[in-house]
Amino acid sequence: MKNKLPPGQFETENWPILHVGDVYEFQEETWDFRLFGEVKEEVTLSYASMMKLPKTVSSINMHCVTTWSKFDSIFEGIAFRELVNLVELNEGVDYVKIYGYYNGDRFAYSANLPLEALLEDDALFVYRWKDERHDWEDISPKHGYPLRFIPPEAFYLWKGTKWASGIQFMKGDEAGFWEEMGYSMTANPFKEERYR
């Protein structure tokens, strides 16, 4: 199937870098990843433990709310579902917030997403990528190294948390960083759900 450009978007071969705040400086000895919220027992993973989880390679199209779209980027990472498998969810969990670094606080950024949409191969915590113009390389610090969440293409890319640090499992939907500023809770680029 031919790639479909969402309305109001233009195609680029580059992967533009856009972010707010400073860039996280990775230190393996202090890095961890938390699974918390509506779970029977919270789990905290070290970087070494995280990187021992099964890996997935997937082609994912990215659509940024600033109007660029990049098709056919190949990412390697840990599928979101692998992390779900590490916890026992309480009954009624339908949403998550994926947390990441913002201005000195590893849990100051978040993006809300529906749980069910994230259980296939196109929802990854990625650490390396390639495309037609690049061989495999680690994602850069400005792109979210050491782990950046890449959402399915049914979501604008602000849902793709950089410098990912945890997942909160929730029974109800809650606004994340950009959603609190008026951006769409659902963020479907094919429906131009940019703002509330």
Image (cartoon, rainbow, N blue to C red):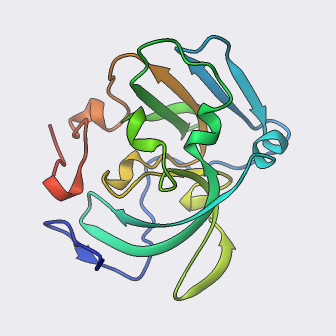
**In the rendered view, would you say 116 is above or below 56?**
above
- When asked about the image quadrant of residue 11, the answer is bottom left
Q: Report the side of 44 relative to 61 (left or right).
A: right
What residue appears at the point 71 percent right and 22 percent down from the top-left corner? 43
Residue 44 appears in the picture as rendered: yes
- Residue 120 placed where, x, y %? 48, 49
- When asked about the image quadrant of residue 32, the answer is top right
Residue 23 appears in the picture as rendered: no
Q: How many marks?
A: 0
Residue farthest to the front?
A: 1
Q: Nearer the viewer, residue 22 or 130?
A: 130
Q: Nearer the viewer, residue 157 or 52?
A: 52
**In the rendered view, would you say 170 is above or below 31?**
above
Q: Nearer the viewer, residue 180 or 1?
A: 1
- Residue 133 placed where, x, y %? 53, 88
- Residue 57 placed where, x, y %? 61, 64
What residue appears at the point 40 percent right and 83 percent down from the top-left corner? 13
What residue appears at the point 38 percent right and 75 percent down from the top-left corner? 71
Q: Report the side of 24 relative to 47 (left or right).
A: left
- Residue 137 placed where, x, y %? 68, 74
